[in-house]
Image (cartoon, coloured by chain):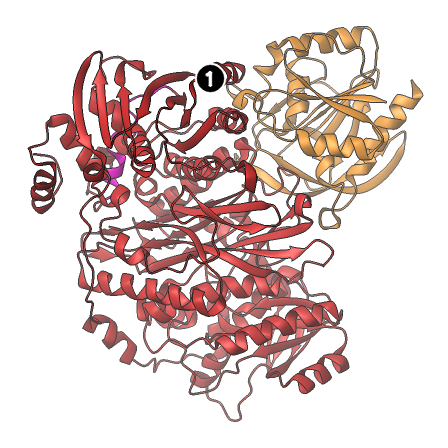
Chain colours: A red, B orange
Amino acid sequence: MSLSVDENLKKEIEKRLKRTPNELETHLFEALWSEHCGYLHSKKQLKKLNFKGSLFSDENSGGVKIGNRGVFFKVESHNHPCAVEPYQGAATGIGGIIRDILALNARPVALLNSLKFAYPNTKETRHIINGVTKGISNYGNSCGIADIAGEVIFDECYKDLPLVNVMAAGLAPLDKVKLSAFREDLEVVLLGSATGLDGVGGAAFASKKLAKNKNEEKIHVQIGDPFIKKLLIEATLEILDLDGVVSCQDCGAAGLLSSTSEMAYKGKCSFELELDKVHLAQKNIEPWQILLSETQERMVFALKKEALPEVFKIAQKYELEVSHIGRTFKGGDYIIKKGSKILSLTPLDVLCNPYCYDLEPVFEPCEIKCLKDKKCELSMDIESAVEKMTSSYNLVSRKWFYEQWDYLVGGRSYVTPESTGVGVLKFEEENCFVAFCMDTNPLMCALDPYLGSQNTLLESYRNLVSSGFEPLGFTNCLNFASPKGDDTKYSFVKSIEGLRDCSLKLNTPVVSGNVSFYNEAKDKKIYPSVTVGMCGFLDINKPVIKSNFTLQDEIYLVGKMINKNSNIGGSLYQKELFDFLGGSVDEPDFELEEKLKKVIFCLRDKKILKSAADVSKGGVLGTLFRLLCASNVGFAGKLINEENADDKLKLRLLFGEIQTRYIISTRNKKELESYFAENNIPYLYLGKCIGDKIKFDGYEFELAKLREKYLNLLQNALED
Amino acid sequence: MKAAVVVFSGTNCQVETKAALEACGFEARYVDSNTKNLDEFDCIFLCGGFSYGDYLRSGRIAKFTPLVESLHNYVEKQRGVIAGICNGFQILCEAHLLKGALIENDCLKFVCKNTPLELDFNGVKKKINLPVAHREGKYFYRGDVSELVFLRYLENPNGSKDNIAGLYDYKKRIMGLMPHPERAFFNENFGFDGREIFKIIKDELKRG
């Protein structure tokens, strides 16, 4: 064998196959035994996650049950393609995740994204940011799926290594859901764009480090067509509603090969593919290229013979190309035929069951241990610190991004971006609202992957709770460097254990997920970036809690109180002000977490609560700054709760990040305080929304000036 | 009153538009691009989206469908009112049923936000807010169309000439606007000002 499958894997393949694979088969194995398709390094770890309560754990996407319907959601990465071709990379990322939801017969209704870039200080980075944003805009908007929420994080570790994680959510009546496994004696049909050379080898490309010369990699990037996607969505939903249609899967990484082999393997039957029948975009395309092409906008269906005419009729109605490419029967082989000649016959349990690495045992590498032991001794006067923090790309409004995405199309969107921490959809079918959010905390995961991933999940949890939603389940995207590195092995294993333990404690299952390794270049790795996308539920008769203030609101901090001994490792201010990363990460307090959820819901029902937001990046002052600027109101009060604090301690108290805290507002001080006292809730009165300045502990800042920066900083940086 | 909601390949605001029409008391029905006769309808709605992917340019391909041909007949017969929202407005301009053209926004980006507007109907001016969501929404016309304009931006989001957001034909039987009234109809978070636009259409229909 040649190509890029490593020597040990080659031996393993030959051993299991009991022969040397031919040239075509070598290509098949290269794709299916790649990290991207085969999850070689992650499969064993992913089994640790808590799926209890999820609808499916082994389908194109999982979901949660609401009434008689399933809400399906999943996040996927398109990091490598976006690094070399930002526009198409992002567009096809959206395209791919939409198809995963669609394959279940769920109509996709929302998109979210979690984007990570370097600071927009160089032309190259601005090119990536603009391309990715436009890719999402042009593709998502024209498919007619609302892009309702997300996050953008800036850090130099993402220089040339952007992370583009996109999430889609869809809705389907449970009795209409279609799964992906083939059954015996079915006809297999390929619907959608004609197969061409675009994206050939994409799966293998996504399974290694990026080469130096980006132009060489461009051939691996797929090209999306949102108009065809829109037609494909409508046609697929119509086809999947037919009785005779049994199963469906999209063609994503490793194209036709990956989808049909997985479907056959899951269905425990043989599949025979007739290459001559596949509708092609060009002549002179090799058999292996047909199998591995990642041409976008294609779906595979398995159906009973009687349903064929009806499927072809629907394809014709939507003016989509379709071909009858093969059939299934009793057995366990993957058979590729060209004319009457069999090009390859391989047992599916070899093809689809790649060798999996064991990452364990892992040990904490000294790089991470040393970081934890470091202490931030640097300081700065508060005025300069506020000036710098309010100019942080990480804390200002994401308006520049979300105004390019249609967050309203579809008629379900319920809130404007930045009026709550989450995107909210109205599901009148089940008399409820459903909210989604995405969060990542790379700094905390770098310091302590176990606690960092827990805190990431809890940030999403608090985002939902602060908007009034009961968290139901989550999806995740694990972005890491090469799994060959000991530090990455350790971080990856600990992140998974963190997610598992947190998910068990919160009784909230993981429903789906994705892993992206090899996010590294020469001498450079990204921070472990565990991205969580969460889904929550709210009765339609209850109000969605907003996060913004109005004048005369009384502001409180509820939850854990910060002091000079708190663990604030991974706080954004240390990175932004001093380029420091170190110290211990705060541990979650699950009991308090649960208690505060009840408090917020109860205060809402008693109509004492006016607004709520979780305290996250930037600590109390960072969060307050964002809320005040977004609401355009001033503030006067006291934020520092320690006597005789020096600047270093003040910075810690103002910007330090610990867990389990909310900022809430009320117009009913007396009732709120007596409720807190009665229920023994830790809280601190911060102050009142008043005037046009932000005043605290003797410091004073002009709201108008801060707000100007808050609203326009990113636009100025990105459009220059 | 019967309303047709036109669904081209790539149209994506039909559900909200139909719901808004029904809430206004219309009996609304979807019709597709092959519809050859529209006489049974009192008004025709061309709604938002990306008909035919907006390929070549927005509205360009939709213009050649049988539906648009029947729109011309519908106008000749003076049968009823035609309204185009966003992509619908682009199609009406492209089909020369309304004056002018909609070209790429000055910022060269898609813009999705709530926008303050001045509604000017029968001499009564009123400030309303409606969401816009488009990349080709900059209105342009070489001549003077000021007497046809019923909707102007107060904070021009796209560089439209004279802040034009919506206008009529000379007979006031065809109207087009870039903002989405159907998105400011059902939900307090986006306001209810969209109802004003649907009210105008109803009033126009009553006028006969």
Q: Determine whether the residue tagged by mark 1 lies in a helix, strand or loop.
A: helix
Crowdedness near tag 1: few (<14), some (14–19) or many (≥20) residues, C-alpha within 10 Å:
few
Question: Does A651 appear above or below A476?
Answer: below
**Is A551 or A230 nearer to us in this picture?**
A230
> Residue A271 location in percent, x, y?
28, 26
Q: Is residue A202 magenta?
A: yes
Q: Quadrant of residue B52?
A: top right
**Is B78 or A262 nearer to us in this picture?**
A262
Quarter of the rendering occupied by the N terminus of chain B: top right
Q: Which chain is indicated by disc 1?
A: A
Q: Quadrant of residue A179?
A: top left
> Residue A332 location in percent, x, y?
24, 32
Task: Name which residue type carries label 1.
Answer: Glu
Question: Does A81 appear above or below A222?
Answer: below
Q: Residue at x 72, y 14 (%)?
A: B97
> Residue A61 location in percent, x, y?
43, 44
Q: Which residues are magenta?
A: A194-207
Q: Is residue A131 magenta?
A: no
> Residue A392 location in percent, x, y?
46, 62
Quarter of the rendering occupied by the C terminus of chain B: top right
- Most extreme residue toward the bottom is A644
Question: Does A478 appear above or below A177?
Answer: below
- Most extreme residue toward the right is B207
Q: From the image, tell me which residue sits under label 1.
A: A306
**Is B193 or A476 nearer to us in this picture?**
A476
Q: Is residue B66 visible?
A: yes
Q: Residue at x 34, y 27 (%)?
A: A295
Q: Residue at x 67, y 23 (%)?
A: B88
